[in-house]
Image: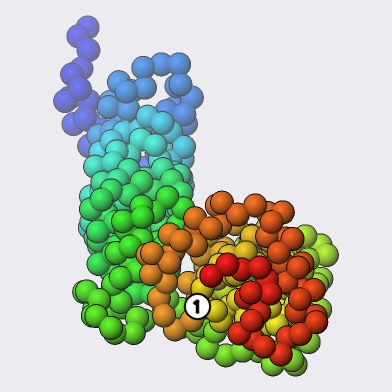
């Protein structure tokens, strides 16, 4: 007896599927997925190619709730039927598409690029949360995605940015402070990109000579100095956080970005051992050296130090200032910083009436 050809089998399947109740189609789908998952020692590529057409026909007969479970199961497979994957990954129902977009290793970069360019925000956010994202996919997401998608990509260490993606983000940052801040603080952002970010003001395509730059944060730290009552309110919480080991880079970074001035100044004082008066002075000083020294003495990392500096005044931090501050931070010994802060504290305790001399009292060179 001669075996039926694949074409004859598909014809028979089409006839069977057309007369098959939706509930039975769903059971067949589930059974095929179990077959794929249990066939890891067999030539899966051949198997998935055989069942691909069957799955496509069954999918048109079942409810979206059954497709959600089907999608979640396929997302776990390293080898899966390609046409079926593409159909599900671009499905209008977000709960059907997102499990595959988030986890499936069988979807190619070209497949993800197509979805990123043609589907909605939920689809894009699922792709932006993948463990690893190829440059061509990142570029497609940045090109079509909104702020939420761009920020999700910037915050994902597995996203690989091409020069074209950086250029698109710099262009978008001209009207978006959140993207500017996130990309500036992202580890690994090239210095050339940071320079462009810091020289393009929101709403403008190029900086104007002698024009005041737009601040990175909506509430700059130096715009309002806390009063004694603010410090008295902030100190118990800051001391408690320090006591349990939670007064760390993440916490201080949050204070800086949110413009929580009293919390930030008190945190620097507690961590570095410098009095509030010294912290106020270095935060307001045009020279960054004192602030970098206080941050270094506080055992903060460079990204947190940069966040504090970027949010402390109404002027953007220039590229040259950033480079100088980073050089100071990287070459300054922790012991030197702590000794200088302690010496500054003793000097401040003898006389704090002359704010102009506080930088010299801290041992800060000009």
- Give how far across and how far down residue 170 sits, in percent: 28, 64
- Give how far across and how far down residue 336 sits, in percent: 69, 56
Q: Which residue is pictured at 80% across the width and 73% down the height?
A: 346
Q: Which residue is pictured at 66% across the width and 79% down the height?
A: 358
Q: Quadrant of residue 244?
A: bottom right
Q: Residues within 10 Å of mark 1 (few under 14, many from 20)?
A: few
- Give how far across and how far down residue 107 sits, in percent: 33, 39
Between 202 and 79, the one nearer to me in the picture:
202
Q: Which residue is mark 1?
A: 286
Q: Which residue is pictured at 16% across the width and 25% down the height?
A: 7
Between 257 and 62, the one nearer to me in the picture:
257
Residue 54 visible here: no
Residue 354 drawn above or below residue 189: below
Does residue 193 appear to the left or right of 338 in the view shown? left
- Give how far across and how far down residue 43 sits, in percent: 36, 17
Q: Quadrant of residue 259?
A: bottom right
Q: Which residue is pictured at 49% across the width and 55% down the height?
A: 327
Residue 250 drawn above or below residue 203: above
């Amino acid at each position: 007896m001669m075996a039926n050809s694949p074409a004859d089998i598909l014809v028979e399947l089409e006839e069977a599927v057309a007369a098959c109740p939706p509930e039975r189609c769903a059971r067949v789908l589930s059974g095929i997925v179990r077959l794929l998952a249990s066939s890891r020692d067999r030539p899966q590529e051949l198997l998935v190619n055989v069942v691909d057409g069957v799955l496509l026909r069954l999918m048109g007969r079942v409810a979206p709730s059954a497709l959600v479970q089907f999608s979640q199961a396929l997302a776990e497979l390293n080898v899966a039927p390609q046409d079926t994957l593409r159909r599900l990954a671009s499905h209008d129902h977000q709960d059907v598409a997102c499990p595959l977009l988030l986890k499936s290793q069988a979807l190619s970069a070209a497949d993800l690029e197509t979805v990123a360019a043609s589907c909605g925000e939920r689809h894009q956010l699922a792709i932006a949360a993948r463990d690893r994202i190829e440059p061509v996919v990142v570029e497609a997401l940045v090109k079509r995605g909104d702020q939420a998608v761009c920020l999700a990509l910037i915050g994902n260490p597995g996203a690989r940015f091409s020069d074209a993606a950086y250029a698109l983000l710099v262009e978008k940052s001209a009207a978006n402070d959140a993207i500017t801040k996130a990309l500036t603080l992202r580890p690994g952002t090239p210095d050339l990109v940071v320079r462009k970010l810091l020289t393009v003001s929101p709403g403008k395509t190029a900086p104007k000579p002698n024009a005041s730059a737009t601040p990175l944060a909506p509430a700059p730290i130096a715009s309002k100095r806390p009063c004694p009552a603010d410090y008295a309110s902030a100190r118990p919480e800051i001391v408690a956080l320090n006591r349990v080991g939670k007064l760390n880079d993440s916490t201080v970074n949050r204070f800086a970005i949110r413009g929580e001035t009293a919390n930030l100044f008190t945190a620097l004082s507690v961590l570095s051992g410098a009095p509030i008066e010294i912290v106020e002075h270095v935060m307001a000083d045009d020279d960054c050296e004192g602030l970098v020294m206080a941050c270094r003495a506080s055992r903060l990392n460079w990204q947190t130090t940069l966040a504090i500096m970027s949010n402390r005044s109404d002027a953007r931090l220039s590229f040259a200032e950033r480079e100088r501050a980073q050089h100071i931070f990287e070459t300054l010994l922790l012991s030197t910083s702590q000794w200088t802060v302690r010496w500054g504290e003793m000097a401040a305790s003898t006389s704090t009436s002359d704010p102009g001399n506080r930088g010299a009292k801290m041992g800060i060179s000009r």
